[in-house]
Image (cartoon, rainbow, N blue to C red):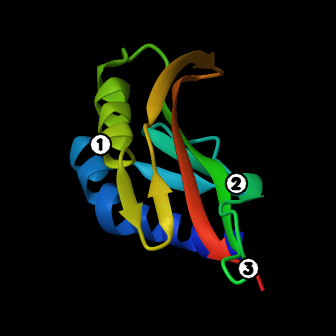
Amino acid sequence: MRFETATKEIREYWRDNVKAEVLSLSPGFVLVGDNQEILEEWTSPYGRISIMPGDTQRATIGAFTDNLHRSTGITMVSVFVPFGTGDELALRMTDLIARKFTAVTTGIVTFTNASHVRVGRAGKWWQFNVSCPFSFDTTAP
């Protein structure tokens, strides 16, 4: 349930704090999640969000009454713009997304330093990825 809660909070953070600003840059922008179909006829920029779990380790030393565990993961936001239209829009969007996911805590999730990388051509799209590392703490029973 811990990762489920973190995933829900990350999606809500996107909806409540990032989506409107991305839409102001590209009004037709659509963000899809893993296991969601991309329609072949799409021509507007779009994104894909993947929330991937990492390791969980005990975060405290001492009595078992202080049984704190820290879990890590990465939220990857891939941004796709039509190939041949340049990268200015993609760079503005990825800069915005990286800024919104850097040094912020939302509920139980804390994001550290987001970064982005130019992936290049992906079929009829030009792709950039924004990597947003996060962690969250839970108390084990």
Question: Does residue 20 lie above or below 131 as drawn?
Answer: below
Query: Label for residue 34?
Result: 2
Residue in the image at 55% along x and 44% along y: 133
Q: In which quarter of the image is the N terminus?
A: bottom right
* Horizontal relation, residue 63 to residue 95: left or right: right
Are the residues at dot 1 and dot 2 in contact (C-beta closer than 8 Å)?
no
Q: Kindly identify the amino acid type of the residue bearing the numbered disc 3.
A: Met
The reply to whether residue 82 is in sight is no
6 with respect to 12 (left or right): right
**Which element carries disc 2, helix, strand or loop?**
loop
Residue 101 spot, x, y in % from top left: 39, 48
Q: CB of mark 1 within 8 Å of CB of mark 3?
A: no
**Quarter of the rendering occupied by the C terminus:** bottom right
Picture layout, residue 72 above or below residue 84 = below
Identify residue for label 3: 1
Distance from disc 1 to disc 2, alpha carbons, whole Å, reads 21 Å
* Residue 80 marker: none
Mark whose residue sits in front, 1 or 3: 3
Q: Which of marks 2 and 3 is nearer the N terminus?
A: 3
Query: Which amino acid is tagged 2?
Result: Asp
Lateral position of residue 56 relative to residue 90, left or right: right
Question: Which residue is depicted at the point 57% across and 63% down?
Answer: 136
Name the quadrant containing residue 137. Answer: bottom right
Q: Would residue 136 be found to the left or right of residue 16 on screen?
A: right
Which residue is labeled 1 in the image? 26
Name the front one of labels 2 and 3: 3
